[in-house]
Image (cartoon, rainbow, N blue to C red):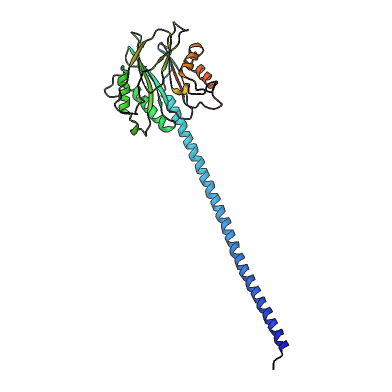
């Protein structure tokens, strides 16, 4: 017959051994998990180092790509300025200033003799900024310089604008359009014929009446080039005399906030130019006084013609 006390002691020893075995098993399990975590940590460190190497390589590639794009952008900017005409020292004399608000803008201008008696002046402003706007601007200017519009008499401003409108529909130009002021000066008669397509007026300052209010040269109803097909453009004419000044400009020359917080107008710019603005640079410096630090909100383009 068994002894109950002995059985109880034996059972207690068995329970202790089982508890000990469970503890050993738990330690082994935790040790295995620790080894797995250690391996996972080492793998994560190795992966992290590999990712860092890849990021460093991609950053270097990105820096090289950005440097290349900046160089190409600089090349494009230099090209835009390279096609601008040289300033003329004989009548009609010219002076001009183009200050893009970004690296590449949509403003451009030109002038050239059409024949021995006719001289053309033009300034255009493509909507928006960047490469697309600059490309359209350069293309249109080159077409005008080369007189490369089919069935257009370049001495007739209305024919030129109608031909431009047919050549550059906005649906074929990534939905971009442009405004333009185009004038033709007859040296024999002193007549200046002009037409506008959605563009601000030019400013005519008379040499023989310096106190007179400057004249604003604009036509009514002219729609921006490329916006709508089959548009008829109006032509007007004015007589200009020796010493008269014509300022052909973009809206970026005056669309800045004035001293009272209101936007400057063409009339404000005309009044300053008649009294104080002897050069495009002087006018630009005056406009900049109303703007905070940094570039103007839009491209500043001003072409001055002295007859």
Which quadrant does the N terminus fall into? bottom right
x and y, in percent, of residue 203 in the image: 43, 15
Out of 48 and 183, give the one closest to the viewer. 183
> Residue at 62% of width from left, 71% of height from top?
28
x and y, in percent, of residue 144 in the image: 34, 23
Determine the residue located farthest toward the top in the rendered image.
Answer: 208
Left or right, 274 with reference to 233? right
x and y, in percent, of residue 174 in the image: 37, 34
> Residue at 30% of width from left, 22% of height from top?
232
x and y, in percent, of residue 254 in the image: 48, 21
Left or right, 163 with reference to 107? left
Residue 241 sits above or below residue 82 on the image: above
Determine the residue located farthest toward the left in the rendered image.
Answer: 151
Left or right, 233 with reference to 88? left
Determine the residue located farthest toward the right in the rendered image.
Answer: 5
> Residue at 60% of width from left, 66% of height from top?
33
Left or right, 211 with reference to 222? right
Residue 129 sits above or below residue 26 on the image: above
Determine the residue located farthest toward the bottom in the rendered image.
Answer: 1
> Residue at 50% of width from left, 42% of height from top?
62
Tell how many labels. 0
């Amino acid at each position: 017959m068994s002894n109950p006390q002995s059985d109880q002691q034996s059972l207690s020893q068995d329970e202790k051994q089982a508890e000990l075995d469970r503890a050993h098993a738990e330690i082994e399990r935790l040790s295995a998990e620790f080894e797995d975590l250690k391996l996972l940590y080492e793998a994560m460190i190795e992966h992290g180092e590999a990712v860092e190497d890849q990021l460093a390589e991609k950053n270097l590639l990105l820096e090289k790509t950005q440097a290349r794009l900046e160089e190409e952008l600089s090349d494009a900017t230099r090209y835009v300025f390279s096609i601008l005409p040289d300033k003329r020292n004989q009548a009609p004399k010219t002076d001009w200033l183009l200050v893009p608000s970004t690296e590449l803008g949509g403003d451009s201008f030109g002038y050239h003799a059409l024949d021995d008696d006719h001289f053309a002046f033009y300034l255009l402003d493509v909507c928006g900024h960047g490469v697309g706007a600059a490309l359209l601007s350069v293309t249109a200017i080159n077409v005008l310089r080369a007189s490369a519009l089919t069935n257009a008499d370049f001495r007739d401003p209305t024919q030129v604008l109608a031909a431009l409108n047919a050549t550059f529909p906005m649906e074929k130009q990534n939905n971009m359009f442009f405004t333009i002021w185009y004038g033709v000066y007859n040296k024999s008669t002193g007549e200046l014929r002009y037409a506008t397509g959605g563009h601000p007026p030019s400013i005519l300052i008379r040499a023989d009446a310096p106190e007179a209010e400057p004249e604003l040269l604009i036509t009514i109803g002219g729609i921006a080039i490329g916006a709508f097909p089959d548009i008829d453009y109006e032509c007007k004419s004015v007589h200009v005399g020796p010493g008269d000044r014509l300022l052909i400009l973009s809206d970026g020359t005056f669309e800045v906030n004035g001293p009272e917080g209101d936007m400057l107008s063409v009339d404000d710019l005309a009044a300053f130019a008649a009294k104080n603005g002897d050069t495009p640079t002087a006018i630009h410096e005056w406009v900049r006084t109303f703007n905070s630090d940094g570039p103007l909100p839009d491209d500043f383009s001003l072409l001055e013609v002295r007859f």
